Image (cartoon, rainbow, N blue to C red):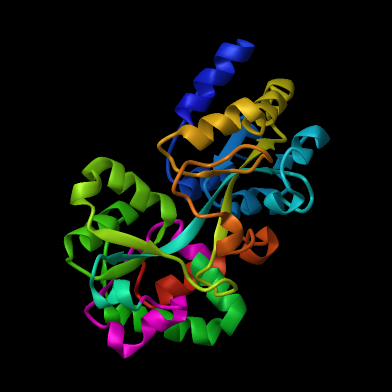
Amino acid sequence: MKVLAADFEKRTGVKVNLRSGDEAELANQILQEGSASPADVFYAENPPALSVLDEKGLLAPVAADTLKAVPASDSSANGDWVGVSARAAAFVATSGTPADTAPPASVLDLAKPEWKGRLGIAPSETDFAPVVTRVIHSAGADAAKAWLLGLKANAKVYNSNEDLSAAVNSGEVQGGVIDHYYWFRLRDEKGAGDTHSVLHYFTKGDPGALVDVSGAGILKSSKHQQAAQALLAYLDSTPAQQLIASSQSYEYPLVAGVQGRSGLVALGTVGTVADATQLGDGKQALQLLQDTGLLQ
C-alpha cells in the first residue's frame, strides 16, 4: 500500500497518512470511534472487516465510475466498498513428499486421520477465517466444528502464514493451507534452488478453493470525501493495477486488461470470487475457532 499511496500523492498532490495494522483491530477501532474517527478510507485484506463497518452504516457509497472499473462480484452488493485485488487459497506441500505427490482434493480431507503429524495450520491469520466460513456454508456449523477439531488433532499450529510456509519448505511439516502469494514471496526470498515446496489448488467448487478480494471503503464521517473518492478511483485505475500486478505482493489485479505476474495460475481455474455476503462479518468462523481452542 505504501507504493500505491506514494504514486497517488505524486499524481494528485493529495497527502496520504497511512496507519497499518491488523484489519480486525483497525475495524474495531473505527467502530469504537464512530463518527469521531479521524480515518477517511479503510482498506482491508478480506471482505469481513469491511462488511462489519458496512453493516453498521459507517461507509459512504463509492462513486459509480469506480465501481464499474471492476466486476460487480468483486465489490459489496450495495456499492459501499470496492474490490482492489484478489488472492487464492492454496495447499503448499514439501516437494516430493506424499503431500505433494498425492495432495488433498478437498480442504475437508485435511481433518482425516492420515494427515496426523503431517499438517501445519495458522488459524490466527485473517486469511484462514474465510475458509472456515466457506466450510460452514458448505457443510454446516456442526460439521465445520468437527473439521476444525480434526485439524487441531492433526496439525502443528503456527503464528503466521510466513512461518507455516517456511516450515513446509524445510520439511518440518508436509503441507498447509495458505494464500498463494506467501509461497511466491518465499521463493523470491530463498531463490529457486532453496525452494523445496510446491503449490497445489483444491478442486474447483471446494470450500478450500477460495478466491478472495481486498477492498476499500470511505467512512461517512470523513471530512475529505472528494479526496477519498479520488483515492478509491486511483486504486482501480490502470496505473495502480499495473503497480499491483508488477509488485512483490503477487496479488491479482482486478481491472480487465491488466495481467498478473508470470507464474500465477488463472483465477478462473481456481474458482470464482467468494460472495462477500456469504463471507459475512466472519464472527461465526471466529466463534468456532475459539470454541475448538484454535484461538484463545
Residue at the top extreme, as displayed: 13
**Residue 197 sits in which quadrant?**
bottom left
Residue 185, magenta (yes or no): no
On the image, the x and y values in percent for residue 73 come to 72, 54
Name the residue located 25 percent from the left edge and 41 percent from the top edge: 189
Residue at the bottom extreme, as displayed: 113
Report the front residue among 274 and 105. Answer: 105
Report the front residue among 169 and 30. Answer: 169
On the image, the x and y values in percent for residue 113 come to 31, 89
Name the residue located 22 percent from the left edge and 45 percent from the top edge: 190
Residue 22: tell me if it is visible.
yes
Residue 262 is left or right of residue 73, and the answer is left
**Residue 155 sits in which quadrant?**
bottom left
**Residue 153 sits in which quadrant?**
bottom left
Name the residue located 67 percent from the left edge and 61 percent from the top edge: 275
Q: Quadrant of the C terminus?
A: bottom left
Q: Which residues are magenta?
A: 103-130
On the image, the x and y values in percent for residue 206 come to 55, 75
Q: Determine whether 152 is above or below 282 in the image.
A: below
Residue 96 is left or right of residue 38, and the answer is left
Report the front residue among 154 and 247. Answer: 247
Q: Determine whether 238 is above or below 6 in the image.
A: below
